[in-house]
Amino acid sequence: MLKDCMDKFYGIYDEDKEDYIFEDYYLKEGTYLLVNENGDVEKEFKVTKNNNDKTYDYYDKFAEMDYLSKLIDMNKPIDPSKVIHSNNYLSFFIKKDSIKEKLTEDIIDAYYDILLNPMKKYEKDKNKKKMYKEVEEEFGKVHEEKLQKNKTWIKEHIKNLIREENKEKNYLKIFFEADIEEYRRESKKYVIPNIYNSTQYNINIKGITYGLPNDNMGLNAKKPYLENKSRKNTLPYLISTEEVSKQKKFFDYLMNNANQGKNNVYVSDDKIKCLPKGQFLEEDFNGHFLRIQKGKELEIHDFDNIVGMRFKINNLQVKMVIPIDYSKIKQTLDYGKIENLKELEANINSTFFNKFLSGNYFSKPKDIRLNDFIVKENLLMYREAFFAWFYKGNSSVIEQSFDKLTMCLIKNSISNEYLIKAKEQYNLRSGVLEYFKGVKNMADITMELSNKLRKKINNDTTDKIESDDEYYFAVGQAVSYLISLNKSSKKMHSLINPILNCKSNERLNGEIIRLFQKYDYAIEKRNLRFNNLGTMILGYIPEGKLNENLLISGYLYSNLIYEKSKTENGKGEVEGGKDHE
């Protein structure tokens, strides 16, 4: 997995130059000082949450020195007290609040003493000692005169660099003017002996050192479950010094992007794109996907291979299957063609999940402030599948689940008396299901059913229902009408749930009769439309399974019993009635 990504990564970038790390390097909050050879602060740059000016002349220089001077992690410091967080004599990193509270001359002396005599640090670890000797042979010993000069400067000035009243807890980072190659050499003297998770796992094979990498991997006595007990060598995996160096740089690159909230990483043969939350890869894609997160170290939370991802969408159109009068209410659903995944996510997010989906793909359940339990339950159950569809191009799980989950949310909206919302949900659902399954256009189906039913309920003689589809649409119309007769303030919740929960035609038939008996006092005997509708429903026995899709469609559709006839308008034709809500 990682090797494939790294091979592509180094197929694009030059490993030696490291420019890819600094292209978009992110300086953390703090104060950055550059001290020249005369001991004067030549440059000062302050980074805050609201000010990280990358156009600053010395930003790139500070970025490169910062990268080369930072610790691999806090478990591998130069300073045994962990107060000083830099890795070489050319830099000095410390939290501002530690200067007054923790920093002593003894700590400063110990830091520089180890940099001057690194063998003191590694004398108890023969593998690290060996690795340090090799790198020191290549790059030479530390420049003692410069080290002592920098140490003296720190002792003389460090306490005066921060005001007494300072309450900031970010970093003060001091850099001493030197050629960047010197920074690189001193950085390698620290990095190479500390690059593995622990040198106790190192082995030598034909003169090449192999060990357990530190990135995204922890192994110690408290984590025996990470070992592969079925092998002679139980370590999860071992890589050479050359490979582990490459891997570290790759992880440094990823961490830099994670620091900026760019958590979605797409790795292809010719490019790498790291995108923040809510931003889409607006192109076709084949390659690897990584979901990364900033923690104490870089964390890889998800990895996937992507084949044939398409940002653009063909043949997905949202139509007004259920008519909605928007003259007095705000329209939240976009009708017409949905042309890409970004538009689709926005519509599904607002229409089905109250705008809680897109920002909560990876949130802890307790952090999602969504009061509707049904919506939250479905969000938690299907958010991973939605993420796979929108950000990895894999719709397979949602294709299998969309019918069920959206019907659940529509029923929930009806139960809570959000009828306009339920209608928009039904309209969006119909468009997506047609896109997935190629089903017949629901707008045409409902129009045809409503036209047939309109004629039949307005006949002087009672007609008959001709199909299961027509029957369930008619049942929805009848239930909608009967519930509308309820005069209490709470119309929907207690009345519609028994209908929505029906699993068989027999149960449905019984609930319809119960509703009729409850409200027959409010129905005039000369109500031709309802009499025709009720008689046709009771006279038809469906052959197939209960079709809750068309039942809901009939329930949400403008009620035909309330339509004004043309004689009522003096025009001689039937008019469409408004939504009865």
Image (spheres, grey):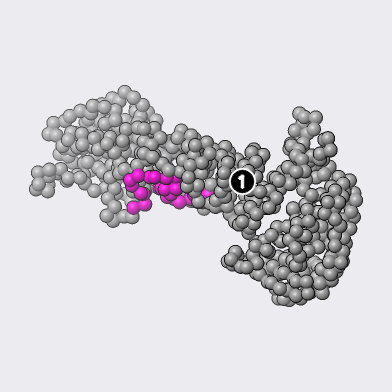
Could you tell me residue 91's position as x and y percent?
Answer: 77, 64
Q: Nearer the viewer, residue 297 or 191?
A: 191
SS class, disc 1 = helix
Q: Residue at x 63, y 48 (%)?
A: 13
Q: Residues within 10 Å of mark 1 (few under 14, many from 20)?
A: some
Indicate whether 534 appears above or below 196: above
Q: Quadrant of residue 411?
A: top left
Residue at numbered disc 1: 12
- Give the side of residue 450 with respect to residue 31, left or right: left
Q: Quadrant of the N terminus?
A: top right
Q: Residue at x 62, y 68 (%)?
A: 57
Could you tell me residue 174's position as x and y percent?
Answer: 74, 67
What amino acid type is highlighted by mark number 1? Ile
Indicate whether 328 appears above or below 380: below
Boundaries of the magenta span: 331-360
**Outermost residue toward the top in this view:** 543
Q: Residue at x 75, y 33 (%)?
A: 228
- Give the side of residue 16 with respect to residue 142, left or right: left
Could you tell me residue 140's position as x and y percent?
Answer: 85, 55
Q: Nearer the viewer, residue 446 or 189?
A: 189
Evaluate whether residue 28 shows in this view.
Answer: no
Indicate whether 44 appears above or below 556: below
Any magenta on residue 245? no
